[in-house]
Image (spheres, grey):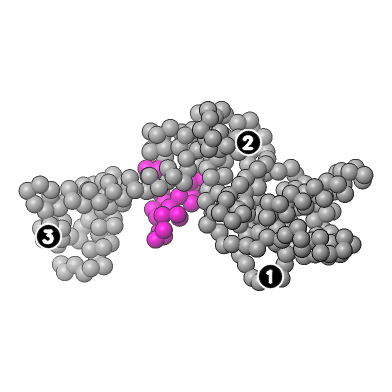
Amino acid sequence: MSFQLKDLQNLLYRLITAPSGVAEGLGTEHALPAGGLAALVDGDERLSAEARVDVYADMYFYRLLEALKEDYPATLAVLGEANFHNLITAYLIEHRPSEPSLRGAGKFVPDFLRRHPPRAQVPFVADLAMLERAIIDVFCAADATPLEVSEMNALEPELWGAVKMRRIAVSAVLRAHWRVGEVLRAVEEKRDWKSPGRERNRILVWRRNSRVSYREIASNEAAALAMLARTTKFANVCEVLARGLPQDQAPQAIRDTLARWLSEGLITRAGRGKRDQPRS
């Protein structure tokens, strides 16, 4: 049988990514040339053809493992080295990387953890991985030009309601069932972490310049920011922010929230050109 370059590349990929190793992968190959793998890969007295491919198989897995440790440091911390190793082993069997960049290799880890949860020890780990993944995605998202305080101050207050705005593309609002922000913060600050309380909450993740931040947000702010995933008049946002508040407290609450958004660089004014939409 004549092997073309494409055939050889596909064979090596199958062997390097074989879940149980190169030897078992070879057992499933029925179209090898006479002489088997040795006819395609040179061996010598130190390493056989199979052993040489095994070197690349080990490099493939451990490079991905190290990359995912960097992407999910808090998930690693709560699972421990051995459990994280086993998690990534199982994960890569189901989700072989399909992109040139390592950034995409771990994008399905949170979903994988929801379907294969280590329930007894760390039932909150899928939410934690979700937060860590959002931080990666926000960090790598397209830049946005935030709305500045000076732009709003340049308008008469009665015109503010008509201002069309949206949330910056480098942001996400997450729905969590555990207070995992506390765990991530502890790991980042190299403090001992403790299991978080189980409570539905919303977590805002955003980037200003090169710094990614996150914080829990109340229900009214979460609803307003969800609305701002699309271009919206500020007057409509005010209605959402004021829900359930006493009439005499609503104006100050709205002003405080807007001031915080502006200081965080969280919103942009519509009409500045087409940009990617933020994640809801």
Q: Is residue 100 left or right of residue 112?
A: left
Q: Dots 3 and 2: beta carbons under 8 Å?
A: no
Instruction: Give the Cα distance between marks 3 and 1.
Output: 60 Å
Q: Which is closer to the viewer, label 3 or label 2?
A: 2
* SS category of the residue bearing label 3: helix
Q: Is residue 187 left or right of residue 163?
A: left
Does the image show residue 174? no
Residue that badge 1 annotates: 272
Could you say which quadrant of the image residue 35 lies in? bottom left
Could you tell me which residue is drawn at 25 percent across and 59 percent down? 11
Instruction: Give the Cα distance between marks 2 and 1.
Output: 36 Å
Could you tell me which residue is drawn at 24 percent across and 65 percent down? 7
* SS category of the residue bearing label 2: loop
| Magenta-span inclusion, residue 21 | no
Of the two numbered discs 3 and 2 on the same chain, state the one appearing first in sequence.
3
Could you tell me which residue is drawn at 28 percent across and 55 percent down? 14
- Work out whether 119 lies above or below 268: above
Residue that badge 3 annotates: 39
| Magenta-span inclusion, residue 96 | yes
* SS category of the residue bearing label 1: loop
Q: Residues within 10 Å of mark 2 (few under 14, many from 20)?
A: many
Of the two numbered discs 3 and 1 on the same chain, state the one appearing first in sequence.
3
Amino acid type assigned to the residue bearing label 3 in the image:
Ala
Q: Is residue 119 left or right of residue 97?
A: right
Q: Which residues are magenta?
A: 88-112
Q: Which is closer to the viewer, label 2 or label 1?
A: 1
Residue that badge 2 annotates: 179
Does the image show residue 108? yes
Could you say which quadrant of the image residue 208 lies in? bottom right
Give percent across and percent down for residue 222. Answer: 72, 48
Q: Dots 2 and 1: beta carbons under 8 Å?
A: no
Toward the left, the furthest residue is 45
